Amino acid sequence: MNWLDSVLAIPSIGLGLSGKISHATRLREILLPFIEDRYKVRQVSFPQHSPIETYIELDTGYRIKADHQRLFVEFQYSVTGDAVPGSFILPKPPERQAFSAMLETELAMVKDLWKEIHKNADGIRISFLGIVANAFLSKGDLPPGIETFFEHLRKPWPLGLWAGDGNFIAILDKTETEIHRCHHRFNAPFHAENGEYTFVFDYQQVFSQPTSVSDKQMSTYLSDLQTTALAYYERFAAGSLNYE
Amino acid sequence: MSELAFASTMEATVPEWQKQPASTLETRIVEPRPFDETVSSGGISERPVFHLMMRDTKNAVIPRDTQTSPEERSAKPISASYQPSFDQETWKDLIDQRQKFLQKKFGPGLARQEQQQLQFLEWKLNRLEMARARESLNRIESIVARQEAIAAELCQAIKGIQRPG
């Protein structure tokens, strides 16, 4: 069992694209009909502040964002509510889903989308692949490795830390053709008894050159990335990094 | 936030030695310095900055909380109520793994890495057991609710019987 299944955590998957503006409109032409046929679409929008971006929200809560730089699949819990007297809405907590189940769904979606893109526009190249885990934790629920990480940060200050807000990008593996790195973003209200800690892990496989990737290769890349990213998230939460 | 309001919110959380009259507190809330933001090829912002929300005042260290309001400080976050669904197989698997570590602990002893693994396993088990307890509590809660509904109906019926007499 991955530790992210035992807390409130939401996955997302991103593909970095080669960055040509013309690809953004091409992607829109390819993806819209495919997505409309395959999924139940709740909303499609082209944000005013970023007209080359296509933003598709599905009925299941998954969202697809595509522009010239990236293709991104994420999940968002939607809050529903019951009408109560006085025209008020009483919010109902959403039905929670396990992190790994949502991740599997997103992986299948990205593989499908990439198959369609590659079939219709094989000139679009990949600059990176990433798996993101957004974890929301309360003070008593922090896994031991995150406690160890915070203890490590506290060391220079004998009176402790009031709060922390950080962003680290660590290099985890490096070859001539690619780098594995992980963005760690966190917000930690150490002082607050009931504060919510947020921790975002963004594990990325970054290619030194934008690479042409077939749909079969993409499937392999994503499955391998899933294994390595989840293994790293486990190592981090177990406290198995070197803190000496 | 006014000085007085700020001082009163600090009252409950700041130790005695850190307290000082409200008049010496700075009213200025210092914003964190802007990030030196660069954008990577993938359009993901890279902000290799770590900043701490800790501010000094004139004479003593008074931590300033610019992130949470007093209301937020007293309310429990939604993540606090989240518990995974209980899965018997996962639980058994974790128990078996823990057993192996415990046997080694009381035998040849555990290496540092193994001690961490054991602690992590116990954290996972704890989360699962909380979920199991919650399921039992939910069952008890629904039984209590049913009993209470029956009791209310009975009271109503008894009142109805007693009234004519």
Image: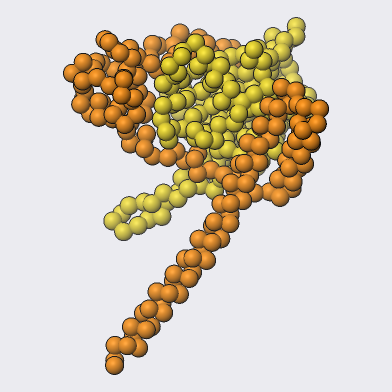
Chain colours: A yellow, B orange
Residue at (41%, 30%) from the top-left corner?
A192
Q: B44 and A34: which one is in front? A: B44
- Seen at 21% across and 15% down, the residue is B24
Query: In this rendering, is residue A193 above or below A93?
Result: above
Q: How many marks?
A: 0
Farthest residue, direction top: A176
Q: Is residue A56 visible?
A: no
Is residue A140 visible in this depiction of the protein?
A: yes
Tell me the residue at 44%/69% (across/down): B148
Left or right: residue A137 versus residue B69 is: right
Q: Quadrant of residue A109?
A: top right
Task: Name the spot of residue A191 as percent of width and height, x first.
Answer: 41, 26
| Residue A11 point in image, percent of width and height | 60, 33
Of the pair B92 and A228, the residue shown nearer to us:
B92
The residue furthest left is B23
The quarter holding residue A20 reads top right
Image position, residue A22 (x, y; %): 58, 18
Name the residue furthest right: B108
In the image, is residue A185 above or below residue B153? above
Image quarter (top left, top right, bottom left or bottom right) of the N terminus of chain B: top left
Is residue B51 positioned above or below B76 on the image? above
The residue closer to the viewer here, B152 or B47, is B152
Image quarter in which the C terminus of chain B is found: bottom left
Asked if residue A121 lies left or right of residue A152, the reply is right
Q: Position of residue A63 (x, y in %)?
A: 55, 35
Depth check, front residue: A233 or A178: A233
